[in-house]
Amino acid sequence: MFVAYIIQSQVDKSYYIGHSSDIHNRLEYHNLGLSKYTSKKIPWELVYIEIFQTKKEANQRELFLKRQRNRRLQAIQIKFI
């Protein structure tokens, strides 16, 4: 199982989009400051997740969401976990 996800910084409400095979460990990784990009905006909260059967599908969805970020990210229904 793979997921595409969106996390939101509780510091400035910015978003980070990614994909992972283990969302719980990935979120912990972000919140421990181990990711260069997200380390300065801790803590992060998971606000959106989609499940896929393959890594390729999750990666394609991540790229789609990133392309939409500047245009329509606010229009994507955010599912609170």
Image (spheres, rainbow, N blue to C red):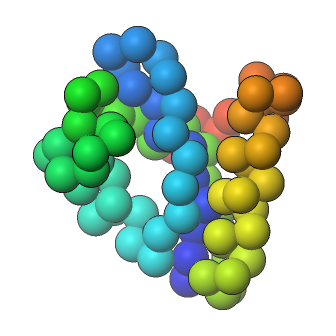
Horizontal arrangement in the rendering, residue 1 relative to residue 25 (left or right): right
Total marks shown come to 0
| Residue 47 locus on image (x, y percent) | 54, 38
Q: Can residue 33 be seen at all in this image of the molecule?
A: yes
Q: Quadrant of the N terminus?
A: bottom right
Q: Residue 80's image quarter?
A: top right
Name above or below for residue 68 compared with residue 73: below
Residue at 79% over, 54% down: 64
Residue at 80% over, 39% down: 68
Q: Residue furthest top?
A: 12
Q: Residue furthest front?
A: 36
Name above or below for residue 68 compared with residue 74: below
Q: Residue furthest bottom?
A: 54
Name above or below for residue 29 compared with residue 75: below
Q: Residue 54's image quarter?
A: bottom right
Q: Residue 22's image quarter?
A: bottom left
Residue at 50% over, 22% down: 14
Q: Can residue 31 be seen at all in this image of the molecule?
A: no
Could you say which is closer to the camera, residue 2 or residue 35? 35
| Residue 42 locus on image (x, y percent) | 25, 29
| Residue 55 locus on image (x, y percent) | 61, 82
| Residue 59 locus on image (x, y percent) | 65, 70
Residue at 54% over, 64% down: 19
Horizontal arrangement in the rendering, residue 57 relative to residue 81 (left or right): right
